[in-house]
């Protein structure tokens, strides 16, 4: 009974817990009180612009950087505090680096076997072959890194990280050296490989498409802190603040006025939905008059030839099945619209549009008067 209870407890304990993490280089703070946890079997992503501290967080988890504040636990055990830094090799963490970091003088098999020196030779050979097959490189064990494509080299790096059966896999901008098409395809394949291996992972990237394709949960980072920890759907449709709204996806802000706790008026009409408290603590009680910026995503603007509301086509970006139009409204403000590509309109043409907004995303305006929509 005790063993069963211990297994159940281990399954409930997060594989990774980062609590109030602080780190600085010299006098420059890089990570500021950052906290998050990762459930076993999940894939998380730290997503943010260059210089926000996401790679430093990964290096602290791996044991490459000492902590100046906070605590890191892996599988329930403390591996990092300001007074204690367990060495990387004792943390049961696998690392996939941005530049792959393969040994050029070793074959694919030799690279994958690098962290398996403690195993007897037959077991080591079997594990190497298993990992090579897992990442889809069967038959290439005797090849050298320079004989492989970038995508294949990344798979070797992944196989090497998986070989010692780590508790946690860390991936630092793993696809940044690959072209866009290969990056998207390999991201989905790597997610499936990680799932089959039944391990947990933390990915660091500045590319939201990678994050959305791979991660169960995503932390949007800015200046060393997490602005929102959530799934992709909520980050896109329910951003916690204006930074997240700007960073995730595409869109344009237009001025509006709060008409009631559930109605916001903008140039294109009235939006119905709960007005977030982030637009101002007094908005819900005042009933009318709060000036806000309302976020419109490209999928909020629907092309409709029958609509009386017209907008001028300023730019167009062909995306195969869809065209992303930049449109100018009557006021001169610009919005984006994602339209099926068989609606191929010319620059300067005026097209009919209407609103189809499921989530009202609004933030209190700092200045500039807003159009009276009441």
Image (cartoon, rainbow, N blue to C red):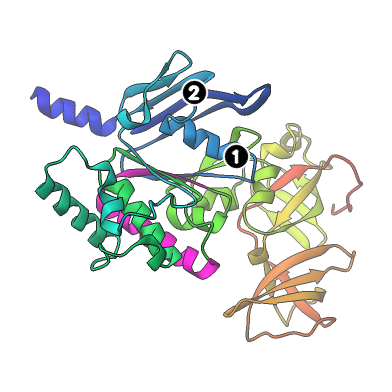
SS assignment for the magenta stretch, majority: helix
| Vertical side of 256 occupied by 200: above or below | above
**Residue at the far left in the pictured view:** 1
Position of 211 with respect to 17 (left or right) is right
**Residue at the far top in the pictured view:** 83
Q: Nearer the viewer, mark 1 or mark 2?
A: 2
Residue 201 in magenta?
yes
| Vertical side of 154 occupied by 71: above or below | above
Q: Nearer the viewer, residue 322 or 115?
A: 115
Q: Nearer the viewer, residue 270 or 127?
A: 127
The residue depicted at 40 percent of the width and 60 percent of the height is 153
| Label 1 sits on residue | 221
The residue carrying pointer 2 sits among few (fewer than 14), some (14 to 19) or many (20 or more) residues within 10 Å by Cα, namely: many
Label count reads 2
Position of 156 with respect to 270 (left or right) is left
Q: Nearer the viewer, residue 278 or 374?
A: 278
Instruction: Write down the quadrant of residue 280 in the picture.
Output: top right
Report helix, strand or loop for mark 1.
Answer: strand
The residue depicted at 69 percent of the width and 43 percent of the height is 243
| Label 2 sits on residue | 66
Task: Measure how far apart labels 1 and 2 are at the Cα level.
Answer: 20 Å
Instruction: Write down the quadrant of residue 30 in the picture.
Output: top right
Horizontal and vertical percent for residue 232? 51, 51
Position of 46 with respect to 353 (left or right) is left
Residue 59 disc label: none
The residue carrying pointer 1 sits among few (fewer than 14), some (14 to 19) or many (20 or more) residues within 10 Å by Cα, namely: many
**Residue at the far front in the pictured view:** 105
Q: Earlier in the sequence, mark 1 or mark 2?
A: 2
């Amino acid at each position: 009974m005790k063993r069963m209870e211990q297994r159940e407890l281990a399954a409930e304990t997060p594989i990774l817990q980062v609590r109030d993490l602080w780190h600085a280089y010299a006098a420059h703070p890089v990570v500021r009180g950052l906290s998050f946890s990762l459930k076993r079997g999940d894939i998380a992503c730290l997503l943010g612009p260059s210089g926000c501290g996401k790679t430093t967080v990964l290096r602290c988890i791996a044991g490459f950087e000492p902590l100046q504040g906070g605590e890191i636990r892996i599988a329930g055990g403390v591996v990092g505090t300001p007074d204690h830094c367990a060495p990387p090799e004792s943390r049961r963490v696998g690392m996939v680096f941005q530049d792959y970091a393969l040994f050029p003088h070793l074959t694919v098999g030799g690279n994958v076997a690098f962290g398996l020196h403690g195993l007897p030779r037959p077991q080591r050979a079997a594990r190497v072959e298993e990992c090579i097959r897992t990442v889809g490189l069967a038959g290439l064990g005797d090849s050298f890194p320079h004989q492989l494509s970038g995508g294949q080299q990344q798979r070797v790096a992944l196989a090497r990280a998986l070989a010692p059966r780590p508790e946690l896999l860390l991936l630092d901008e793993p696809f940044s050296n690959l072209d866009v098409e290969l990056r998207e395809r390999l991201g989905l394949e790597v997610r499936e490989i990680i799932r089959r291996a039944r391990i947990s992972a933390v990915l660091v990237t500045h590319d939201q498409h990678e994050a959305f394709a791979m991660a169960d949960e995503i932390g949007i980072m800015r200046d060393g802190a997490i602005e929102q920890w959530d799934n992709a759907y909520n980050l896109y449709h329910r951003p916690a603040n204006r930074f997240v709204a700007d960073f995730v996806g595409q869109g344009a802000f237009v001025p509006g006025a709060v008409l009631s706790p559930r109605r916001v008026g903008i140039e294109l009409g009235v939006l119905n939905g709960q007005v977030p408290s982030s637009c101002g603590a007094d908005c819900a009680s005042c009933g009318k008059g709060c000036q806000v910026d309302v976020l419109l995503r490209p999928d909020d603007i629907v092309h409709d030839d029958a609509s009386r509301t017209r907008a001028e086509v300023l730019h167009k970006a062909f995306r195969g099945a869809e065209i992303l139009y930049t449109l100018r409204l009557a006021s001169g403000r610009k919005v984006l619209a994602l339209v099926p590509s068989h609606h191929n309109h010319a620059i300067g043409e005026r097209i009919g549009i209407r609103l189809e907004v499921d989530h009202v995303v609004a933030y209190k305006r700092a200045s500039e008067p807003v159009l009276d929509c009441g």
